[in-house]
Image: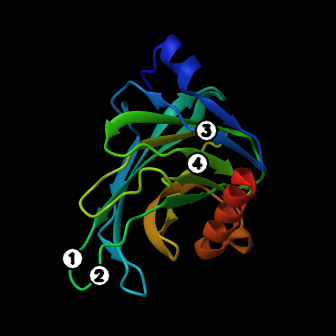
């Protein structure tokens, strides 16, 4: 991925299932050596509050081994009419199983998230301090996983309501394990509120 040893030590946050961690900035430029990349179309939520775009990428080789995949995400608040362009505050990414993951935040892009949460079925990033307002893009968020497969699925963009946006995500083996991302967003937000309390 191109992380220097010092940067990796200072920026990586290990998130066990059920845990939260304060995000720190990593001074590198985002995904390098991608094996797959996808940029979603602008996706509006059902209430007309916001339109979100998600850039996603996959790289191979991380803390978990040479074949283990890292998933990268950047969230942009776009507002084609008729949405109102409400600020985005969270991004939820489904995670199969209940494995610990390592999260990094890199400085490429705009707003830095302030918190990462692993609910056990999703990893959520929060921009409660620096919300992603209209026309802004987040920094890249990286999730180092032990998983070795990916597919084009959904992540949840959240401003208080949630909307599914197409992105590259870890492969979930059985369709019966799919979870609605609205529920993931609510679970992540509940974990965040417990963390702040």
Query: Callout 1: helix, strand or loop?
Result: loop
Q: Which residue occupies 64% across, 63% down? A: 189
Give the residue number, with chain letter if any, for mark 4.
149
Give the residue number, with chain letter if any, for mark 3.
22
Q: Which residue occupies 73% across, 56% down? A: 119
Judge from the rendering whether residue 118 lies leftward or rightward of residue 165; answer left or right: right
Measured from the top left, where is residue 164 in percent x and y?
Answer: 48, 73
Q: Which mark is residue 80?
A: 1
- Asked if the residue at tag 4 contacts the one at tag 2, i.e. Cβ–Cβ closer than 8 Å, the answer is no
Instruction: Classify 10 Å Cα crowding around label 4: few (below 14), some (14-19), many (20 and above).
Output: some
In the image, 116 versus 156, the foreground residue is 116
Measured from the top left, where is residue 176 in percent x and y?
Answer: 73, 74
Marks 3 and 1 sit apart, C-alpha to C-alpha, by 33 Å
Disc on the earlier residue, 2 or 3:
3
Instruction: Classify 10 Å Cα crowding around label 2: few (below 14), some (14-19), many (20 and above).
Output: some
Instruction: Classify 10 Å Cα crowding around label 1: few (below 14), some (14-19), many (20 and above).
Output: some
Which callout, 4 or 1, points to the residue nearer the camera?
Answer: 1
Give the residue number, with chain letter if any, for mark 2.
83
Q: Split into 4 quadrants, where in the image is the C terminus?
A: bottom right
Disc on the earlier residue, 3 or 1:
3
Disc on the earlier residue, 3 or 4:
3
Measured from the top left, where is residue 160 in percent x and y?
Answer: 52, 73
């Amino acid at each position: 991925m191109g992380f220097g040893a010092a940067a990796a030590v200072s920026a990586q946050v290990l998130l066990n299932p059920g845990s939260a961690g304060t995000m720190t900035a990593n001074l590198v430029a985002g995904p390098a050596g991608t094996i797959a990349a996808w940029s979603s179309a602008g996706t509006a939520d059902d209430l007309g509050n916001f339109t979100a775009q998600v850039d996603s990428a996959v790289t191979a080789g991380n803390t978990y081994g040479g074949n283990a995949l890292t998933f990268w995400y950047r969230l942009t608040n776009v507002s084609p009419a008729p949405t109102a362009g409400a600020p985005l505050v969270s991004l939820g990414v489904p995670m199969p199983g209940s494995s610990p993951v390592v999260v990094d935040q890199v400085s490429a892009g705009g707003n830095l998230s302030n918190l990462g949460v692993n609910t056990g079925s999703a990893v959520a990033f929060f921009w409660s301090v620096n919300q992603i307002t209209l026309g802004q893009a987040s920094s890249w968020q990286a999730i180092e996983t032990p998983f070795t497969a990916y597919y084009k699925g959904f992540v949840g963009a959240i401003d208080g309501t949630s909307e599914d946006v197409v992105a590259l995500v870890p492969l979930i083996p059985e369709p019966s394990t799919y979870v609605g991302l609205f529920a993931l967003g609510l679970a992540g937000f509940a974990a965040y509120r417990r963390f702040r309390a």
